[in-house]
Image (spheres, coloured by chain):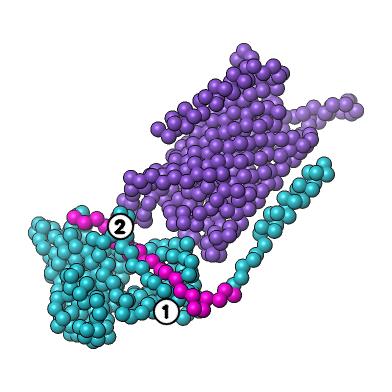
């Protein structure tokens, strides 16, 4: 029901955007079927929650730079008690993000992300809700493209030919713009927080390949988390994701479906300098989705289902995630 | 490019500075007190205990309970330095009754004005020790009335029931036969008081502005299949004053507790 309510909210916005896009006379960024660089946006959804995170980091498939909005809907089930027959709490996390990827020059760009979190759960028939601005992050990226070896007889070739392969190095920071509530620590899902309350470091390595018939994007990220003022430290996290995509031109638009896998590995949470049992875990997800490119507008949908998981000693189960986004190419 | 270099430098600075250690381990706790909540949570194996639910045990016997109560006293905490803090004796006796559990099946024992310290283990007694009983009826304070009201007394002469477990059991020979485990020290004739010491998985920080919790699990299955496995058909359906059977149940009861986790907040 929540999903539909949110969708209802989202639909008029999408409608407005689509009108706006059609009215746009800006040249489309895609001039041929060949692939442009597919760069990452960044989604490190550390909070709201720690179990739903940077492995979800995909943006537009073919635009290096954009500004946009994204909506993410996630479902979890958490055991509210210590026994196998303890009651289960149903959690719904809604995240609304402003995000952007802004170029600095040919080699450098940065990405930024500001979320608004709206988290709710049902325990013993009562509903709890927390909402507010979440944790913002900003990452500086360096892109290293690889060029085809020039043939020996054209040593002084003017233009190096792009091989389609590139690496991206990211160094970023997550800011405690969201509120961390210590009272919520006494809950089975420690991700039921709008923010971690900590300044965290983000280290990323990305690999992209854009060929003539398909593209690949892989992103590995490490989150170095620090202790917040409540002497609470979420576990360091390793996130990975890879995605294969292709494209079909349809009239003036481009449909770009993709398939991928992603995952996270979490270390244990520390409080007052001690690790807490059953707060580590891992999850492996599959994802499917598509983008539709209309002129400079990119509409995206991404649906994620867990393949395997063991979060917080098996006490938290991730159900599914749905993400809808609209980006405007710069 | 310059702007970029500067922004990267700032970023690194921010990350590094946020990692700096500003712990002040010389916190003065003298005179400070705080609250401690001990949550008792009765279970049967990995199941939460529920009244009138049939549970299997050894010897192909099953049991259903309608009353589940036990006495806990002399709660003592040991800090990181090895110092012991004992909750004031006159208040340090509690009836843990499943009937008083919250929605999550937890029975709260709240200790007020506990000395602030970092505690690493908890110990308590199951039942009433001979010293407390020797204080006489007047020396029991309000607890005597409470215990009588809760059915945790026989008479003053025979003293407290340390456990009050009522229900029925079924075996290969009988169906829904009465089950009553009323174990105690029977005055001073037996000493069935047992002490339990449990180390805490995380340090519990008692502070003025905090309300930490220790989540203690009592595995009721161990009462019958613990240190010693007992058979209801073989004399353990009615446990009252017998020296042997009460002693076996007392040992099993002391062995059924564990600390699942702690919360510091």
Which secondary structure lies at badge 1? strand
Q: Quadrant of residue B75?
A: bottom left
Q: Which residue is mark 1?
A: B85
* Percent of width and height locating residue A77: 41, 44
Q: Which residues are magenta?
A: B26-52
Residue at 67% over, 44% down: A138
Structural distance between the alpha carbons of marks 2 and 1: 28 Å
- The answer to whether residue A249 is visible is no
Q: Are marks 2 and 1 on the same chain?
A: yes
Q: Is the residue marked by circle 2 packed among few (<14), some (14-19), or many (20+) residues within 10 Å? A: few
Q: Position of residue A10 (x, y in %)?
A: 51, 28
Quadrant hosting residue A216: top right
The hue in which chain B appears in the rendered picture of the protein = cyan
User: Could you classify mark 1 by the number of other residues whose Cα lies within 10 Å: few (under 14), some (14-19), or many (20 or more)?
Assistant: some
Is B40 included in the stretch rendered in magenta?
yes
Tell me which chain appears purple. A
Query: Which comes sooner in the sequence, label 2 or label 1?
Result: 1
* Quarter of the N terminus of chain B within the rendering: top right
Asked if B255 appears above or below A304 in the picture, the reply is below
On residue B251, which mark appears?
Answer: none
According to the image, label 2 marks what residue?
B102
Front-most of residues A1 and B77:
A1
Residue B108 magenta-highlighted: no
Residue that appears at 44% across and 40% down: A92
């Amino acid at each position: 029901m929540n999903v539909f309510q949110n969708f209802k909210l989202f639909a008029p916005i999408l409608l407005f955007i689509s009108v706006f896009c059609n009215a746009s006379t800006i040249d489309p960024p895609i001039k041929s079927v060949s692939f442009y660089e597919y760069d990452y946006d960044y989604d490190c959804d550390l909070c709201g929650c720690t179990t739903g995170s940077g492995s979800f980091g995909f943006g537009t498939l073919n635009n290096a730079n954009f500004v946009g909005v994204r909506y993410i809907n996630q479902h979890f089930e958490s055991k509210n008690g210590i026994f196998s027959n303890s009651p289960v709490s149903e959690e719904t996390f809604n995240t609304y993000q402003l995000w952007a990827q802004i170029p600095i020059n040919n080699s450098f760009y940065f990405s930024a992300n500001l979320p608004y979190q709206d988290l709710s759960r049902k325990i013993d028939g009562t509903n709890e809700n927390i909402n507010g601005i979440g944790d913002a992050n900003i990452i500086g990226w360096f892109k290293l493209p690889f060029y085809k070896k020039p043939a020996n007889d054209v040593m002084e070739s003017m233009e190096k030919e792009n091989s389609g392969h590139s690496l991206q190095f990211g160094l970023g920071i997550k800011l405690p713009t969201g509120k961390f509530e210590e009272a919520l620590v006494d809950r089975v899902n420690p991700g039921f927080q709008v923010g971690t309350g900590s300044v965290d470091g983000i280290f990323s390595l990305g690999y992209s390949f854009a060929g003539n018939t398909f593209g690949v994007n892989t992103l590995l990220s490490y989150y170095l988390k620090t202790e917040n003022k409540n002497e609470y430290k979420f576990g360091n996290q390793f996130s990975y994701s890879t995605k294969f995509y292709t494209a079909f031109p349809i009239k003036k638009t481009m449909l770009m479906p993709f398939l991928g896998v992603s995952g996270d590995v979490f270390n244990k949470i520390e409080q007052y300098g001690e690790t807490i049992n059953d707060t580590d875990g891992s999850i492996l997800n599959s994802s499917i989705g598509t983008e539709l490119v209309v002129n400079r507008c990119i509409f995206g949908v991404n649906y994620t289902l867990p393949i395997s998981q063991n979060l917080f000693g098996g006490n938290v189960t991730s159900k599914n995630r749905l993400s809808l986004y609209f980006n405007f190419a710069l | 490019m310059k702007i970029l270099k500067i922004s990267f430098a700032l970023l690194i600075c921010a990350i590094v500075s946020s990692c700096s250690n500003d712990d002040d381990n010389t916190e003065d706790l003298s005179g400070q007190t705080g609250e401690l909540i001990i949550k008792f949570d009765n279970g049967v194996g990995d199941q939460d205990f529920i009244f009138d639910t049939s549970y299997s045990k050894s010897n192909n016997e099953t049991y259903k309970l309608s009353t589940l109560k036990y006495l806990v006293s002399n709660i003592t905490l040991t800090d990181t330095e090895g110092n012991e803090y004992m909750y004031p004796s006159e208040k340090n006796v509690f009836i843990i009754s499943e009937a008083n559990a919250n929605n999550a099946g937890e029975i709260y024992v709240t200790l007020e004005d506990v000395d602030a310290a970092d505690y690493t283990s908890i110990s308590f007694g199951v039942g009433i020790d001979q010293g407390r009983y020797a204080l006489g009826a007047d020396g029991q304070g309000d607890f005597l009335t409470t215990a009588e009201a809760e059915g945790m007394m026989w008479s003053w002469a025979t003293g407290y029931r340390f456990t009050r477990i009522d229900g029925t059991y079924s075996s290969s020979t009988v169906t829904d036969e009465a089950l009553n485990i009323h174990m105690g020290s029977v005055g001073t004739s037996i000493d069935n008081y047992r002490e339990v010491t449990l180390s805490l998985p995380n340090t519990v920080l008692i502070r003025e502005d905090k309300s930490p919790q220790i989540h203690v699990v009592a595995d009721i299955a161990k009462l019958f299949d613990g240190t010693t496995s007992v058979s209801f058909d073989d004399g353990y359906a009615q446990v009252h004053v017998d020296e042997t059977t009460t002693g076996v149940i007392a040992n099993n009861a002391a062995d059924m507790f564990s600390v699942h986790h702690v919360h510091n907040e």
